[in-house]
Image (cartoon, helix red, strand yellow):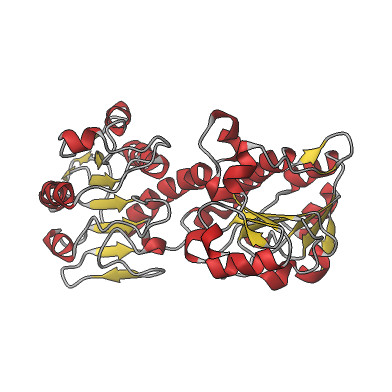
Amino acid sequence: MRIAVLAETDPDESRVAATAETVKKYIGLGAEVAVEAGAGERSGIADEDYAQAGAKIEPEAASTVRDADIVLRVRRPLASEIAGAKQGAAVIAIMDPYDYVSELQSLAAEGVCAFGMELMPRITRAQAMDVLSSQANLAGYRAVIDAAAEYGRAIPMMTTAAGTIPPAKIFIMGVGVAGLQAIATARRLGAIVTATDVRPATKEQVLSLGAKFIAVEDEEFKQAETAAGYAKEMSPEYKAKQAALTASHIAAQDIVITTALIPGRPAPVLITADMVHSMRPGSVIVDLAVERGGNCELAEPGKTIVTENWVKIVGHLNLAGRLAASASALYAKNLLEFVETLIDPQSHSLAIKWDDELVKATLLTKESALAHPSFQAAS
């Protein structure tokens, strides 16, 4: 059994799909591991680290995936990049499937079984495979660090003989994994922290971290969570009430961090241009949802802009990737945990259990067709 680890071609992607530690684990499962040269450089992992762990270093993608049973990547590979893999090989990555159906169809045409790690169900058995949680945790932390770097003042209260510096006020919009980590990080830095989310269950979590919860707590709010734990799309009426509440709150904040995402849909706009213009000069907004359209109306992907009233809007792409070594270590472990479920421990070969709930949830292509229920109409 051959496992191929491809280098990333996206210039904004600094993570890698395997570490020296996980390479050793794959070899322990009976696999031969091939790593494309330079795959780990931006995560601080040299080719010789992989070689010492037992991997074979290949000079290019084509030789890396040749006869591979499993192909690992951070972002979805092009069909041309996995053309040499075996028919029926498992290609595992963050596939971003909803906006790239034609790319999925190209992968399907290669005869591989593509798995989207971001579709992993949030069940107890899959916690160690939850890519969204592991990466969002780091993104939430990094968002606060980036905001502090852009903010021209101290975050905690400081009392000196020359006077007192008041603590920064930080508002977190969206209390998922990223939001909770952002709250915790902001609190550790000494900020006064408030947070909002449409899901009632998050209120207790916010309060437990020492922050104040801000929301319109009406009847719709009480029903605003899916069975899977995600936020529901709210009615226009609720959005209007929530916007009015947050608009007045945002005007008094020093830093606002937005993290709201709904799977398969554009990011909801939470901060309008008028709200931005109401903020004080020197305030900072960090938009974690900028890759999906942004929670801030004025955010631009990959850019930090300064408005006419001197508010900085930070739209960094791939925030988790700004902590590449840490993010790669967690992502690689997520993949390892999933790959172990696809390997027969006796024969040391790929043995996908098609009735496994993890496979059903993440499988996107099979037998040259789209296999996931969400995309079969496009086959």
Spot occupied by residue 191 in the image (x, y as percentages of width and height): 27, 41
Q: Is residue 112 above or below residue 62?
A: above
Q: Residue furthest right?
A: 347
Is 311 placed above or below 353 here? below
Please report the residue visible at 33 percent of the width from the left and 61 percent of the height from the top.
294
Quarter occupied by residue 284: bottom left
Q: Nearer the viewer, residue 372 or 194?
A: 372
For the image shown, how many numbered marks are present on the structure?
0
Quadrant the C terminus occupies: bottom right
| Residue 243 in the image, given as x and y percentages of width and height | 15, 51
Closer to the camera in the image, 222 or 75 = 222
Residue 114 placement, left or right of 269: right
Determine the residue located farthest toward the front in the rendered image.
377
Q: Residue at x 84, y 39 (%)?
A: 28
Q: Quadrant of residue 231?
A: top left
* Residue 213 visible, this angle: no
Residue 111 appears left or right of 27: left
Reply above or below: 17 against 281: above
- Nearest the viewer among 227 and 275 is 227
Residue 97 falls left or right of residue 231: right
Regarding residue 30, the answer to whether it shows in the image is yes
The percent coordinates of residue 232 (x first, y second) are 31, 44
